[in-house]
Amino acid sequence: MNALDRRRFCHTDQIEFARFSGDRNPIHLDPVIARRTIAGQCIVHGAHSVLWVLNSLARVSVVAGRLRARFLKPIFLDEEISCVWNSQAGKVHLSVDGITLVDITFSTAQLPTRSALTLPPLPGRDTPAERSFAECATLTSQAFDLHGDTHLAAALFPDAVRLYGQQTVNEIAALSYIVGMEVPGMHSLLSGLRFSLRETSGSSVYSVTESDERFKQLRLAVAGHFLDAEVEAFHRPLPTRMPSLFGLRSRVHPGEHADAHALVIGGSRGLGEIVAKLIAAGGGRVIITYSTGAEDAERVVDEIRNAGGQCQAIQLTLGAYAAMPTNLPLINQLYYFATPKIFGRRTTPFNEDLYRNFRSVYVAGFETVCTWLIGRGNRCSALFPSSIVVEDPIPELAEYAKAKADGEALCQRLNENHQIDILTPRLPRTVTDQTQSLLHTAGECPADVIAPFVRRMTELIK
């Protein structure tokens, strides 16, 4: 086993590869949009990782005549990735902390005899196609063209270009454009890629050859000028849409929350968004906060105001050293939905860094807001949503569960102060962006879960 290379992919790398390949899918480039995907954050282009491997192998003069890559877990930005080569088995693993993210097998070969063909790129899409799974499955054969800045090939992958030629490197990168911009397009997730090098062909096309409705998986065959390829991709779940304010009005009595002056931490989406709409529908005033995603927050504000409700949004990032705004009006309710990405552990053992990250939000951040509220002198109620995983542990969520349990212990101590009443329900799995998965996993309706607690919170301030 040889460690061929190590690197950290950064946001600048993403931008450069997007220019080179033409694949500008926001799951790779836009952290605000990416947080609402199954990955929860920006991920590295799969073809980028494969070309990095080919470039590393080319430095030791190894030609991969045939290659198969399986993308087991996403590569996130700014984490150290190891490229480990098993020369006897013809395998390369891309891993972080010993966990394999990409599994690559290849066979060596002599390069086919070729002309020095270098085709110019054609204009491509600026934004990905938004196709349903059915539209993808029935798509007719399409031309396989280059759509990026092909001159970047030599700068990004100099050793691969030297060994394979620029056109081959361009065509591997263009596989990313097919998946990320065309099929499935916007809602894509690359799961597999294979190719074999060959002589020049007269045609260059791709087509969908298989589709599996159960898993929303597609298989495409690609014939390039210098390679034959097959790619597999999931049509990943669309971002979860929360009910509209009008859709929630049936759950609220007229004027029920008129006495509520609520601060909803993390109110731009998910359960926090539903809480804000329920309170506004019941005649209360709402301030929602967001850490990132100002557009999501303004969308919620606009919906509530257009329906005659009272709402405003402020930017707030909570942690161990957060400071609360000094100019907020009376607050008598606190809803605390601040959370980092939950499903993100990389290592098998308990991860202390991940635990500290969760604890800074669920303990230090919550204590900061409560201490601020108590210091203002007005009586208030608070909702600290805990989780059923505290009592029914899941190994990969050990850090999250422990931090939530620490938060519950903090709430018990804070409840000794008679100025604040804190509810700490252990909520079941609900259908939100945080709980998306490729396989359909049952979850409770978020409005069904949270509405009774909003009612109880208002009862506590009367």
Image (cartoon, rainbow, N blue to C red):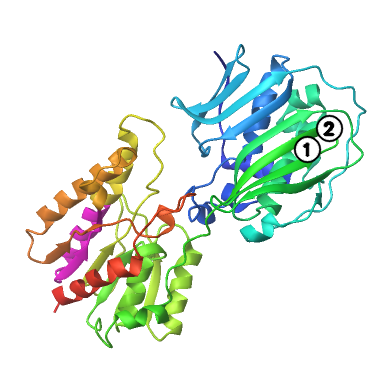
Q: Is residue 320 visible?
A: no
23 to 246, vertically: above or below: above
Q: Position of residue 206 (x, y in %)?
A: 78, 46
Q: Nearer the viewer, mark 1 or mark 2?
A: 2
Q: Which residues, given as a range, are shown in magenta?
A: 365-387
Asked if disc 1 and disc 2 are in contact, CB closer than 8 Å, the reply is yes
What amino acid is found at the position of numbered circle 2 in the picture? Phe
Tell me the tag on residue 288. none
- Left or right, 283 with reference to 121: left
Q: Which residue is drawn at 72% across and 25% down?
A: 66
Mark 1 lies on a secondary structure that is helix
400 to 153, vertically: above or below: below
Q: Position of residue 36 (x, y in %)?
A: 48, 56
Q: List the residue tagged with mark 2.
A: 226
Q: Where is residue 422 in the image (x, y as percent from the top left)?
A: 16, 62
Q: List the residue tagged with mark 1.
A: 171
Quarter of the image where the N terminus is located: top right
